[in-house]
Image (spheres, rainbow, N blue to C red):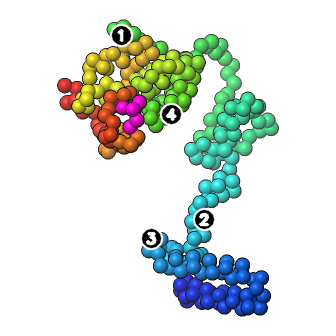
């Protein structure tokens, strides 16, 4: 017997039982209404043509979407261990939460990890220990012919554009970069006033769309580039030769998301989609 036949037989039986109960006792009218809603829901599932599961398994097929909805929570709380989650395990997230709240993040009495597993890393004591440096290690960028070499930190803020991040996020990252002594990469969305307000070192990324240093026609503007590159906060220039997150396709910022501020920062017109070509076009430099 197919699920559809089972539904029709079950619906007929439920309706008959509901009518009988209401006939015997009017207080069962709410039960009858509930049965009516279930039956109407099943009929709707049978008639609709968008979801095959609901069409083949009326009413019952809806539980599939319910289980799909709660699947991440079930997996997180009942399946994953404290160290198996990806990309960040519960152990790492708890560590971040504890440090953010200023509470103790050191757990005594051993570890849950298999310290004998292949790939487990640890530090051994040394018989010839050396004094750790008083300053964090840095990398010198720029050779002897460079007029303005830059001493870069080993860890810096990765490229994230203003537009994909808010003003407050950019300000927080840049102020953090200044406090920590590292650099803040602007991403390809252009050099905004929010990147400069915090006073941190800036790595200005120039992507395939030349945002912030382009002409009205979308070509590279040497004068505008030189003007922004000479700012004190701009310590390095990063050239993005292709779209890493969107290889072969490029990116599109829909016209409805191009605000007056983004238009001014990126030197792009309002009311039009903003395109990031998939690769760097050297002809645009001419």
> Which label number is shown at residue 202?
none
3D distance between C-alphas at marks 2 and 4: 33 Å
3D distance between C-alphas at marks 3 and 4: 37 Å
Q: Circle 1 sits in a helix, a strand or a loop, which is it?
A: loop
Specify start and end residues of the magenta stretch as a single range. Answer: 258-263
Point out the frontmost of discs 1 and 2. Answer: 2
**Mark positioned earlier in the residue sequence (1 or 3):** 3
Point out the frontmost of discs 1 and 3. Answer: 3
Q: Which residue is mark 4?
A: 166
- Judge whether residue 76 can be spotted in this image: yes
Q: Circle 2 sits in a helix, a strand or a loop, which is it?
A: helix
Q: Which residue is mark 3?
A: 50
Comparing 262 with 281, the one in front is 262
> Which label number is shown at residue 66?
2
Q: Circle 4 sits in a helix, a strand or a loop, which is it?
A: loop
Q: Which residue is mark 1?
A: 146
**Mark positioned earlier in the residue sequence (3 or 2):** 3
3D distance between C-alphas at marks 3 and 2: 17 Å
Point out the frontmost of discs 4 and 1. Answer: 4
Q: Residues within 10 Å of mark 2 (few under 14, many from 20)?
A: few
Which quadrant holds the C terminus?
top left
Point out the frontmost of discs 3 and 2. Answer: 3
Rendered location of residue 219, percent (x, y): 24, 29
Rendered location of residue 14, percent (x, y): 66, 86
């Amino acid at each position: 017997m197919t699920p559809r036949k089972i539904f029709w037989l079950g619906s007929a039986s439920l309706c008959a039982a509901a009518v009988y109960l209401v006939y015997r006792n009017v207080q069962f009218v709410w039960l009858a209404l509930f049965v009516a809603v279930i039956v109407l829901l099943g009929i709707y599932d049978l008639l609709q043509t968008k979801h095959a599961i609901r069409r083949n398994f009326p009413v019952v097929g809806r539980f599939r979407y319910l289980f799909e909805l709660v699947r991440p929570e079930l997996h997180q709380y009942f399946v994953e261990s404290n160290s198996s989650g990806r990309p960040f395990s519960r152990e790492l997230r708890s560590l971040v939460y504890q440090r953010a709240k200023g509470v103790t993040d050191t757990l005594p009495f051993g570890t849950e990890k298999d310290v004998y597993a292949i790939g487990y890393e640890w530090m051994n004591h040394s018989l010839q220990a050396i004094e750790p440096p008083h300053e964090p290690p840095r990398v010198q960028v720029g050779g002897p012919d460079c007029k303005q070499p830059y001493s870069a930190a080993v860890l810096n803020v990765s490229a994230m554009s203003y537009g994909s991040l808010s003003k407050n996020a950019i300000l927080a990252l840049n102020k953090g970069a200044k406090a920590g002594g590292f650099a803040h990469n602007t991403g390809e969305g252009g050099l905004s006033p929010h990147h400069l307000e915090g006073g941190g070192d800036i790595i200005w990324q120039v992507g395939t769309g030349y945002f912030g240093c382009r002409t009205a026609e979308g070509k590279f503007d040497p004068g505008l580039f030189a003007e922004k590159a000479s700012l004190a906060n701009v310590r390095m220039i990063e050239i993005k030769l292709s779209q890493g997150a969107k290889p072969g396709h490029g990116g599109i910022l829909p016209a409805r998301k191009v605000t007056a501020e983004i238009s001014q920062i990126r030197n792009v017109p309002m009311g039009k989609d903003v395109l990031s070509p998939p690769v760097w076009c050297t002809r645009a430099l001419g």
